[in-house]
Amino acid sequence: MAEYICRLGTPTGEVVTRTVEATAERDLRSKLERDGFRVFSISATGSVNIRRTFGREQRVSKIKTEDFLLFNQQLSALLRAGLPILQAIGILRKRVQNEKLRLTLEDVEQKVRAGQALSQAFAAQGDAFPRIYIASILAGERAGSLDEVLLRYVSYQKTITEARRKIKKSLAYPMVLVGASLLLVMVLSTYVIPQFMKLYQGVGAQELPSITIAVITTSEFISKNLIWLIPAIIGGLIFIFVWRRTPTGRLTIDRWILRTPVAGETIRQLTIAQFTRSLATLLAGGITLPESVEIASESITNRALREASSGVLVGIREGRPFTDSLEASGWVSELAIDMIGVGERSGALREMLDEVANFYDSEIDVRLNTITTFIEPVILIFMGSLVMTILLAMYLPLFYMIGNMGQNQGVPR
């Protein structure tokens, strides 16, 4: 069965976007219409638009974040200037340098010209655009403030992108140190240590210190089995990469990550910040709380936390307060629940969700700085200890030999 993204009108008058599994698009459309929905558009997930350019096919997949944000900033400016949507998209399509985005906007322009709403035209592009973006456009169309909604989305996306950039920057140097450590071990094991072994065998060294024997044994094991160790490591990494792309593998790995002492709590705080910020952005655009929770849950990248958050929407639809539903999910911190509860009871839920997101953004910055400050010296100490151990193991027999030679020369004949 295939998955389809459906833009539907509910019997109560709401417009929602849902992902539904079906054997064929025609059967799915018939079923939805029988259930009382008005079908605006149906598109297969993961589908890409294909255009012919100079006789060759080009695929439009995901678009670079920088180009996408620039487009939205310019679109918002043109709309504030009073230009119609169709004219604004036409102007930007001609100026866009990114080929993927240009072809996508061409299709969007054609759909809008044919009478579709802008949100429907973007939704028809499959997974080229995040669902929260399409929902924001829909909210802007309903409220008549599309330019303001676009600016709010750009601000949201910049904050999320900056948080990810900080994480990558914080982990870059420790990863370089780990890679250097592994490379050092490989060079010492396959080249340096064997040279010392030949030296000691040549001078007839009999008894070697225990540390030297341990290092030489490890080096011999690595050297003799290098021909299958490297393929085994590469094969294992490929297996993990492929397994991680399956639903079961991704869920299992994400659960393992959450159990790690430091990374698990960091991922949890980052998810709380992203989830609450997404909710605040959607609620500010006029999206209802149930639909906002449904869309914001899809922005959670950790599958284990996304699975845990599925009960929040169920609780809201059953009539329970939002705070109680969050608490029942078991993955949101007590502090965040208390802050959200205050906002819900005072009627300032959106503002409090923004405060929670800002608070955890600051917490993540402090945590990342602490982790980086702690990891770097630990890795440096580990590398220094490793080099010192190997040098000591290689030179200690040489010192013994020099000492024994001095003693033998000092003995009277």
Image (tube, grey):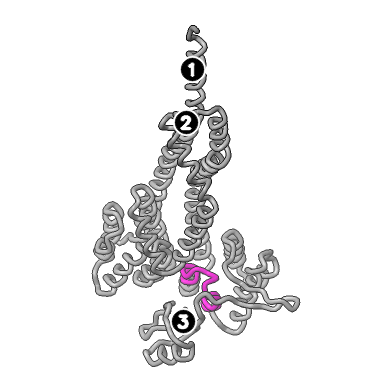
The foreground one among 394 and 109 is: 394
Looking at the rendering, the stretch of residues picked out in magenta corresponds to 120-136
Residue 2 image label: 3
Q: Which of disc 3 and disc 1 is earlier in sequence?
A: 3
Residue that lies at the very extreme toward the right in this rendered image: 54
* Residue under label 1: 403
Whole-number angstrom distance, CA of label 1 to CA of label 3: 77 Å
Residue 75 image label: none
Image: 187 above or below 31: above
Image: 110 above or below 135: below
Image: 213 above or below 49: above
Quadrant where the N terminus lies?
bottom left
Residue that lies at the very extreme toward the front in this rendered image: 413
Residue 271: horizontal and vertical position, in percent?
Answer: 39, 57
* Residue under label 2: 393
The residue shown at (50%, 83%) is 41
